Amino acid sequence: MLDNLKNIFSKPNKILDSSSNELELEKAVSSLLIEAAMADGEFSDQERNHLRSVLYDLFSFNNELINELILETEEAVNQSSQLYGFSKTLRDGMEYDKRLEIIQMMWEITYADGKLDDFEANLIRRVSGLLYVDDIDCGTARKNAISHLGLNID
């Protein structure tokens, strides 16, 4: 499985077929979440821990696979930004409400350390546009993320 995961991250996105659809969606979701966590140039322990929890809940991966996925994706994100490719994969492969959930998860990960950097907010708004998520829904997802994390932000 780890070799398969490494192969996914070393190849550019391709047109989805039925055998690759699930893996491509997992790659795209994980990559956008990690991109959000790293957007401010700092991948804090709080963000990393929240990301692990989200990935476990989403995909039921074991800790070893989650750690490997994070490391592989960190390398891929550091080497180049593929927001358009990942967002296109999600836009084509997920219904609107699922894409909105991804946006909320991105907000939660960026707020996991208790603060939001301008780079993080900008990234999420760009991804929201690329996923064709309405601005009002993006704002609602942000408020829901803050509430879910129990933060008191003015």
Image (spheres, rainbow, N blue to C red):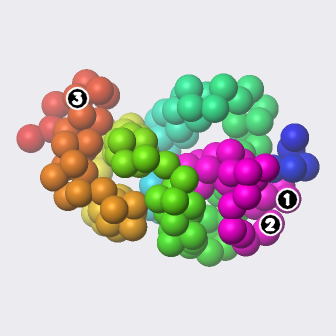
Q: Which residue is mark 1?
A: 7
Q: Are marks 1 and 2 in contact (CB under 8 Å)?
A: yes
Q: Do labels 2 and 3 touch, CB within 8 Å?
A: no
Question: Which residue: 19% across, 43% down?
Answer: 140
In the rendered image, residue 123, in percent from the top left (x then y), is placed at 37, 64
Residue position for label 3: 147
Query: Which stretch appears magenta?
Result: 6-34
Nearer to us: label 1 or label 3: 1
From this viewpoint, which residue is outermost toward the right? 3
Q: Residue furthest left?
A: 154
Q: For mark 2, what is the residue? A: 10
Q: Position of residue 15 (x, y in %)?
A: 69, 68
**How many discs mark residues in the rendered view?**
3
Q: Quadrant of the N terminus?
A: top right
Query: Per the image, is 20 magenta?
Result: yes
Q: Confirm whether the magenta stretch covers residue 83.
A: no
The residue located at (78%, 49%) in the rendering is 19
Report the Cα–Cα distance between label 1 and label 3. Answer: 38 Å
Above/below status of 109 relative to 8: above
Q: Residues within 10 Å of mark 2 (few under 14, many from 20)?
A: few
Residue at the spot 63% in from the left edge and 32% down from the top edge: 59
Vertically, is 147 above or below 117? above
Q: Secondary structure at mark 1?
A: helix
Q: Mark 1 and mark 2: span between their CA atoms?
A: 5 Å
Verify CB contact (< 8 Å) between mark 1 and mark 3: no
Disc 3 marks which amino acid?
Ser
